[in-house]
Image (cartoon, rainbow, N blue to C red):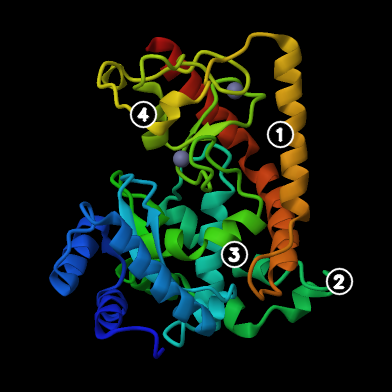
Amino acid sequence: MSQLSWKHHALIQALLSRGPLKESEFHKVFYEITGRNPVEHQQAFNDSLRKINKELGYVKFELRGCRNQYDGKVYYGVVNTLADEQSKLGTKYSVPQIAFYKAIIEAIVQDITTQGHITNIGALNLRLEYQVQGGQDSQGSQSRVPAAFKSFSISQKEKTLNDLIQDQWLCYTSDGRIGLGVRSFLDLRSWFRTSEIPSCDVCNEAGVKAETCPNMECAIRMHSYCLKKKFSQRKVAKVCPSCSTPWPIPESYEGDEEETNESTQDNSPSNDPVTRKRLRIVKAEAVDAAANAPNDGPSQSGPSLRKRLRTCKAEAVDATESQVEETQGLRRSQRSRR
Ligand SMILES: [Zn+2]
Ligand SMILES: [Zn+2]
């Protein structure tokens, strides 16, 4: 760490001791330490982060920023880039508690309605047994379920939920459900990619809490803040960038035009069926490429997690199919009323 000055150390310490910080708070800390405002001295700010990350990389840590998908705000934190939850959640949480956390995260990110939350009851009803399946072989998995998983009670789950929310691994959403905490958004970036969580069409980050294309056969999703930024530009047609289906948007998006880099790109949609077909093929290829991409980091858990996710997904689909249809139907009718 000889390359880092006391200022770099102070920045790292601020994030480690105070947890993930809002962009404005981290900027304030940066200003207090360096005497420079990151908004005016963006280059100096970026250079500092690059220098810090070069050194932190040796010990598998990274200082990064990410968006909280519920409020669209940027947060900064220092994350452990080793991909297993054991090292991320540290020594504070027990093995069944970590399994419970993983079960909640998987339930939230697999929700095809991309509402990014689970109810309290839904979380408490999650079964930890699924966290054991999908290892090297799934035969006899029932007998390999640790006793601590089977005896993990509702009150232990409630306590764990509170702790995870307190530590910002989870959060309460504005409507009182349970969502991903800022720490999870920061930490799970590469896991989202290896787990094939579809990404936002605008920013390419995982679309956990996102809006989906009104066309049920189209897989396009966008974060509401990305959607707002994109569609508030007058030149951009208010249609799905892939299938050109008109995209219903709140009136508040219109008019407050923001000039962004995107306005220089050609976003004109095409109704030409050939183009649409080509787009679909490109999308399919992209999915294949993503699936075949090597895991980033030294994680060994990627493929088995993926397999486990798929297993869980298949099971979850049966259980939630009717519920999902109900929700989608509701959303459709809400949209058509607009
Ligand atoms: Zn986005
Ligand atoms: Zn679409």
User: On screen, 76 above or below 56?
Assistant: above
Give the mark, 4 or 3, whose residue is nearer the N terminus: 3
Give me the residue at 71% from left, 60% from top.
Answer: 306
Residue 173 spot, x, y in % from top left = 33, 49
Q: Confirm if mark 1 falls within 8 A of ligand 2.
A: no
Tell whether label 1 touches label 4 (CB within 8 Å): no
Q: What x and y, as percent, mark residue 147?
A: 63, 84
Marks 2 and 4 sit apart, C-alpha to C-alpha, by 48 Å
* Distance of label 4 from label 1 (alpha carbons): 23 Å
> What's the residue at 68%, 57% (across, down)?
309
Residue placed under numbered mark 2 in the picture: 139
Instruction: Give the number of the disc on residue 283.
Output: 1
State yes or no: Cβ of the residue under disc 3 lies below 8 Å from any atom of ligand 1: no
Element on which disc 4 rests: helix
- Mark seen at residue 127: 3
User: Which is more foreground, mark 1 or mark 2?
Assistant: 1
Quarter that holds the N terminus:
bottom left
Horizontal arrangement in the rendering, residue 133 relative to residue 57 (left or right)? right
Asked if the residue at label 4 sits under 8 Å from ligand 1, the reply is no
Mark 3 to mark 1: distance in Å?
34 Å
Image quarter for ligand 2: top right
| Place of residue 232 in the rendered image (x, y in percent of width and height, measured from the top left) | 34, 22
Mark 3 and mark 1 lie on one chain; the one further toward the N terminus is 3
